[in-house]
Image (cartoon, rainbow, N blue to C red):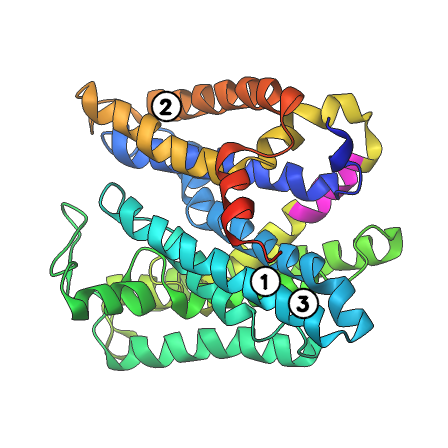
Amino acid sequence: MNKGDSDRVLGFDIARAFAILGMVVVHFSLVMGTGRDSSPWFNCLLGLLDGRATATFVILAGIGVTLMSRRAVSRGDPPAIAAVRRTLIRRGMLLLGIGFLNLYIWPGDILRVYGVALMLASMLIAASSRQLLLCAMAFEVVFVLLFLSVNFESHWDWGTMTYHGLWTPAGVFRNLFYDGFRSVFPWTGFLLFGMWLGRLNLLEPKTNRRVLRAAWATAASAEMLSWLCTSCLPPTAMGLDAASIKALFGTESMPALPLFVAASGGAEVAVIILSITLASSVPAWICWPLCATGQMALTWYVVHIVFGLGAIEALDLVSSQPLSIAVACGVGFFLIAIALSCAWKYFFRHGPLEWCLRRICDAR
């Protein structure tokens, strides 16, 4: 790997690679697959991946914000803190613009939310850890209040996964902040939680084990509570039908209600911790392919939509294959991404889009 990468936490790069794998598999199955596979465990696995990979991506973004701002904040250097804030705002604005372009192709775009979240995070880099956690929870609380007062489904045609009125001022605002595939409320909370998590010394074994236990306990408790509510509540409980009970107490990513946030957040923190453990337990050359891919996560996120999902549409394979075939194609795409990442990183320090983001946005 390049000399300039020696100070990176390679476990975070490995976790990013796993996040890209999860997103590619889920998106290929959504676009290419015909429906549910005959194998219950296979359906369960895909269901668990939905939204979780994106949560990993956003939590890691928050950790990255903390790592970027740590030196300036620890020194209490106002000019340095201001420079970090400018960089985050510029990156957020650029990602917001790229995200709107991406939205023409893919309705599940996360880059717009990522962009807004970075701009909001720029104001909180010097906040206390307690304030970060409170703000993270506030985004979920606001989303729940919106969900209880504003119809989440009113603009969606779930049969065709079409959002009506998207390209109107109200539609753009509503889809971005509330009822899109991924929206500022509550997904910015994941990024702020990642900022808090990045302040822990996750490379220290005792802290690592403690965080891992808490993450597993949180995820397992949320999944168990969800199962109890969706399985044991009668269909007419609280005046709700079965579909409403599943939406309120399930752990699916739409809508991203508290049980999903707890289950996915716990699971993805566990993935991050296990990735750190993997990076410290095996020789660096074994981890290098995954690290190289994770360091190009932004590039591969865009490439898998433009070229991966674009190829599916160009070849007229939309909704035409069994889920097992769609998933196999997604895994194949990821293996190609690993090979190309290794080749690229052998010569260059940053991926193409990562280089552009730094070149355009970083304060100098």
Looking at the rendering, in which quadrant would you find the N terminus?
A: top right
Residue under pointer 1: 221
**Which residue is at a point 17% across and 52% down the rendered structure image?**
158
What type is the residue that disc 3 sits on?
Trp
Mark 2 vs mark 3, CA separation in Å: 38 Å
Mark 2 vs mark 1, CA separation in Å: 30 Å
Residue under pointer 3: 196
What type is the residue that disc 1 sits on?
Ser
Side of 253 relative to 268 (left or right) = left
Check residue 181 for magenta coloring: no
Image-quadrant location for residue 6: top right
**Which residue is at a point 28% across and 65% down the rendered structure image?**
179
| Residue 326 location (% of width, % of height) | 34, 24
Q: Where does the magenta region start and end?
A: 272-279
CB-based contact (under 8 Å), mark 2 and mark 3: no
Question: Disc 2 or 3, which lies upstream in sequence?
Answer: 3
